[in-house]
Amino acid sequence: MLKYATPELYAEIDRRSAEYKERILGTKTEVRYTGTAYYVSEKGDDANDGKSPETAWRTNEKVSEAELLEGDAVFFERGGLFRGQIKTKPGVTYSAYGEGDKPKIYAYKENCAIPEKWELVDKDAMIWKYTDETSDIGLILFNDGEAYANKLIPSYVGGKFVLRSDNSVEFNPSVHLVEDLDYYHHHIVESSNPANPNANLGPRGGHVFLKCVKGNPAEVFSSIEFSPRFNLIANARNNNVVIDNLCIKFAGCHGVGSGTCDGLTVVNCEIGWIGGCIQYYTPAGSVVPFGNGVEIYGGCHNYTVSNNWIYECYDAGITHQVQAHANKFEMFDIEYCDNLIENCVYSIEYFLSRLTPENTETTMKNVLMARNIMRFSGFGFGKRRPGHANAHIKGWSAHNPSKNFVIEDNIMDRATDMLIHVGFSMGDKVVMRNNTYIQYPNGEFGRYETDELMRYDIDKADKIADEKTGEVGAKYYIAY
């Protein structure tokens, strides 16, 4: 019979998690660069040259537009708050300078606790409209985590927003925003395929409608943060980019998002409250939301995500993924190590899927996931994504042609669905070593290699899992 997790064990994991958080939040800036250093400060001016703290720039827009060269570095002042998207440049490092907390990089242009921008549009239902037009908003957070709004996402069928549960009923905010802090983003829907007007539809523009029974939201809360529909750190396909010592929050898509690239490094960062925006509508009109803490979609080489605190992600905390089809992709030299990941749908997600029979050169090799503390998969903001079998390690039942793929020395602490879904159908077996598992009695342990589901059986979950995965040194505990 498995041992029950004791108060002492929980206290030890809490202690180690607090140590991780303290270490990550207190990391000093020790980056190397060979080119010019540029500085960004709340007290700066975009008319400056940016080449010293005394002549610092002011905005993320200036950083994105600047003609930075490989080897350059951009340093944001600690303790400062900088709003808007950052578009990276190849070979550039983005980090922090000065003393104090990591510089905050927030997505939306302003704190939305502005009373005159909230209009009461239905007094009886207490529905408020934010009068500025916005992109789709994936999350609304109040007072830095005191509360967050519950997003209702209807389907889009026949040119109308309709209930997901009943497509014959048109969505009406006054009727269907029922609970306090329910909200809905009413947007224009455009098609990316003129030949098929109902294929791959995406949201464009629109307004937030929020139910707030206590009155004007900006008078109820002193801080209201919107998560707009873009990647906050947009890496495109740039190589050799370093993201270090930044606090990255409130992106409606991804915190750090990239296409195929070499040498992306994300270290020593705080990344939280990410995702929830609509990725697209299917041809049938149903909706697909998304949002990952750090993502590469495509091939990747020398991809490192280490020593980060990542939390409250609508989708994955960390991921590399692509649907290959006939295209050749290589994913190798990947390290996800020493991170604290909490309250995400998937702590770590990966897939290399949908290969055609002719595609025999696509590979995933030299992958290490080690010493991560992963807690509460499918809890918090992570429970807002419906219909997904969440897991701490989520590889799906994909091809994932793997070689030298190791998952070791991690703590995987409770999930509302399964702890692991280590999928692969090609290449070598994924090596599992010395991991610690804590799950609810008779819940799901998960899947390894195939679709066969392993239950977290009180009497024999350890024996079943060890026999299936070949893991040595694992520890299994029953959650209470």
Image: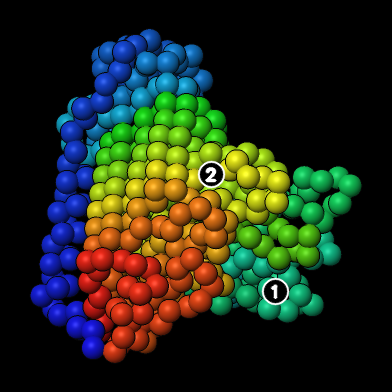
For the residue pair 225 and 411, the one nearer the viewer reads as 411
For numbered disc 1, what is the local secondary structure?
Answer: loop
Q: How is the image coloured?
A: rainbow
Q: Nearer the viewer, mark 1 or mark 2?
A: 2
For the residue pair 284 and 34, the one nearer the viewer reads as 34
Q: Is residue 221 left or right of residue 188?
A: left
Q: Residue at x 22, y 39 (%)?
A: 101
Q: Residue at x 37, y 35 (%)?
A: 265
Answer few, some or many: residues within 10 Å of disc 1's Cα (few below 14, many 20 plus, some between 14 and 19).
Answer: many
For the residue pair 121 and 15, the one nearer the viewer reads as 15
Q: Residue furthest left?
A: 8
Q: Residue at x 26, y 17 (%)?
A: 53
Q: Earlier in the sequence, mark 1 or mark 2?
A: 1
Q: Quadrant of the C terminus?
A: bottom left
Q: Residue furthest right?
A: 195
For the residue pair 422 and 31, the one nearer the viewer reads as 422
Q: Residue at x 51, y 76 (%)?
A: 452
Dot 2 corresponds to which residue? Answer: 363
Q: Which x, y percent locates residue 7?
A: 13, 78
For numbered disc 2, what is the local secondary structure?
Answer: strand
Q: Is residue 46 left or right of residue 258?
A: left
Q: Quadrant of the N terminus?
A: bottom left
On screen, residue 437 above or below 248 = below
Q: Which x, y percent locates residue 344?
A: 40, 61
Question: Given the image, on which type of amino acid does mark 2 rest?
Answer: Thr
Q: Which x, y percent locates residue 391?
A: 42, 67
Question: Given the image, on which type of amino acid does mark 1 rest?
Answer: Leu
So how many labels did they put on this image? 2
On screen, residue 296 above or below 402 = above
On screen, residue 153 above or below 332 = below
* Rendered image: mark on residue 129: none
Dot 1 corresponds to which residue? Answer: 163
